[in-house]
Image (tube, rainbow, N blue to C red):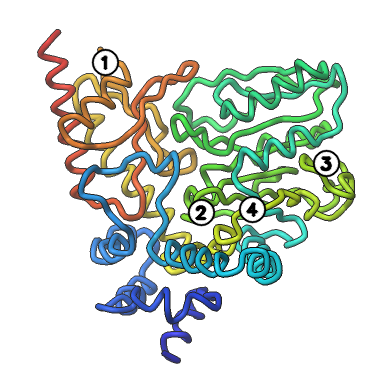
């Protein structure tokens, strides 16, 4: 056990009190430690293709035989140790809820905050723990001091919950929304940046940028946009719901002022767990969305006045960070690029099939969307489920139309081979009908 602890520390694993040995010990049975030691000496790119290692990772998930899940872009499953941590904390809370939740588990929020901050490369006093990206971004959107006539730049391809929040401020307070309309895929950072900068005026106060467009997996050049915005004293909000725990980066590299994510996506934390970041000097300028005794104070914790919350979900975030650290951020990112490239490179050779997601790794991640000529996205979704039991999601949003395919670290090559076969047969069937 001491040797194991030493090895875990070397790879950045710092489990909480409930994690070792009771929760993470099964991961090291049957050669698990040997798998980790072996890939730790590989480059991330080489490790991304090591099927023995990723088969071991797959074993740490509850894989249903009923379907193949390619809709991880919606919400990701938690690995077994995270589920066990969540269940343990839940049972513990139920022994005496008002005591164990409010007097014991509530003390654990600060260690979780510090761990999230370390992973994100920011100060703990800049991090608020909440329930999802929607809550975090709504807190920022409704908390900013804006007045009638102030302009906010958004895109038609941003997430609806965020757009609805901005529309509410426009309708109620008279701010003005200025719209970007993207055409994807794009691998031109300058052109993508100009979409925003060309709309700057002396009335522009905020630019809202989605780090990865959830509909299609397009990554936007947030840093370039932010740098240009700051030259005009314009603030930048970044919606990173789909990048934290997937892409290997620190928040500071984006150059934004405000940021939020859902931890139940790529970090694999319990459902309904999220994180919001606000640059320290700007906290005082954002009003708390929920009631607080100092809604315009300088303490990031003013945003955590949520009433009774799921303490078990919050505490199990640490187990998710531990599992993420075991895999390794760079290895995980490389694996997801590898999986996306594996299936997209094959299906785009078929007649009538088009991938509407960039291929350059600078502009994409795990999510990719496929279009088959003559078929509606919902037809593709239905056919993949009906014949192959493949679960994906049809996307029809603004000028984006396709079936969104999102694998995860537990996805096998056999799963992708069946996806490729399914798309090939669907495309051929449609071609014969013409």
Rounded to the nearest whole Å, what is the CA distance between mark 3 and mark 4? 22 Å
Q: In which quarter of the image is the C terminus?
A: top left
| Other residues around mark 3 within 10 Å, as few (<14) / some (14–19) / many (≥20) | many
Rounded to the nearest whole Å, what is the CA distance between mark 2 and mark 4? 23 Å
Going from the N terminus, do you reach mark 3 or mark 4 first?
3
Q: Position of residue 212 (x, y in %)?
A: 53, 37
Rounded to the nearest whole Å, what is the CA distance between mark 2 and mark 1? 33 Å
Q: Nearer the viewer, mark 3 or mark 1?
A: 3
Q: Position of residue 236 (x, y in %)?
A: 73, 36
Residue beneath disc 3:
286
Q: In this view, does 316 lie to the left or right of 233?
A: left
Q: Which disc, if any, is residue 375?
A: 1
Q: Where is residue 164 in the image (x, y as percent from the top left)?
A: 64, 23
Residue at 64 percent across and 45 percent down: it is 260
Q: Which disc, if any, is residue 309?
A: 4
Q: Which disc, if any, is residue 152?
A: none
Q: Which of marks 1 and 4 is in front?
A: 4
């Amino acid at each position: 056990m001491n040797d194991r602890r030493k090895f875990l520390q070397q790879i950045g694993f710092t489990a909480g009190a409930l994690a070792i040995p009771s929760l993470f010990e099964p991961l090291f049975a049957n050669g698990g430690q040997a798998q980790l030691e072996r890939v730790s000496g590989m480059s991330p790119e080489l490790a991304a293709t090591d099927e023995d290692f990723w088969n071991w990772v797959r074993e740490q998930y509850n894989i249903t035989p009923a379907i193949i899940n390619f809709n991880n872009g919606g919400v990701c499953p938690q690995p077994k140790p995270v589920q066990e941590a969540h269940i343990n904390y839940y049972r513990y809370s139920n022994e005496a809820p008002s005591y164990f939740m409010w007097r014991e588990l509530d003390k654990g929020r600060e260690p979780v905050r510090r761990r999230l901050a370390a992973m994100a490369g920011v100060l703990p006093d800049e991090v608020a723990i909440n329930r999802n990206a929607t809550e975090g971004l709504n807190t920022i959107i409704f908390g900013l001091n804006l007045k009638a006539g102030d302009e906010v730049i958004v895109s038609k391809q941003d997430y609806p919950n965020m757009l609805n929040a901005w529309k509410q401020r426009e309708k109620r307070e008279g701010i003005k929304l200025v719209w970007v309309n993207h055409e994807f895929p794009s691998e031109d950072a300058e052109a993508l940046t100009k979409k925003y900068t060309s709309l700057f005026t002396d009335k522009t106060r905020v630019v809202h940028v989605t780090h990865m467009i959830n509909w299609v997996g397009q990554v936007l050049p947030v840093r370039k946009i932010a740098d240009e915005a700051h030259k005009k004293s314009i603030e930048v909000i970044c919606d990173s719901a789909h990048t934290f725990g997937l892409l290997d980066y620190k928040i500071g590299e984006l150059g934004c002022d405000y940021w939020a994510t859902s931890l139940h996506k790529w970090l694999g934390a319990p459902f309904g767990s999220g994180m919001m970041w606000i640059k320290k000097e700007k906290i005082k300028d954002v009003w708390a969305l929920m009631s607080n005794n100092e809604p315009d104070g300088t303490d990031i914790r003013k945003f955590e006045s949520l009433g009774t919350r799921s303490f078990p979900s919050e505490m199990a975030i640490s187990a998710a960070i531990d599992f993420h650290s075991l895999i390794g951020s760079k290895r995980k990112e490389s694996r997801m690029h590898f999986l996306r490239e594996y299936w997209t490179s094959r299906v785009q050779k078929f007649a009538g099939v088009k991938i509407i997601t960039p291929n350059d790794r600078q502009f994409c991640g795990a999510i990719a969307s496929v279009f088959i000529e003559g078929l509606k996205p919902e037809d593709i979704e239905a056919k993949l489920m009906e014949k192959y039991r493949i679960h994906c999601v049809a996307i029809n949003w603004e000028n984006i139309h396709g079936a969104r395919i999102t694998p995860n670290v537990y996805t096998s090559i056999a799963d992708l081979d069946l996806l490729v076969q399914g798309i090939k047969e669907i495309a051929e069937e449609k071609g014969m009908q013409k």
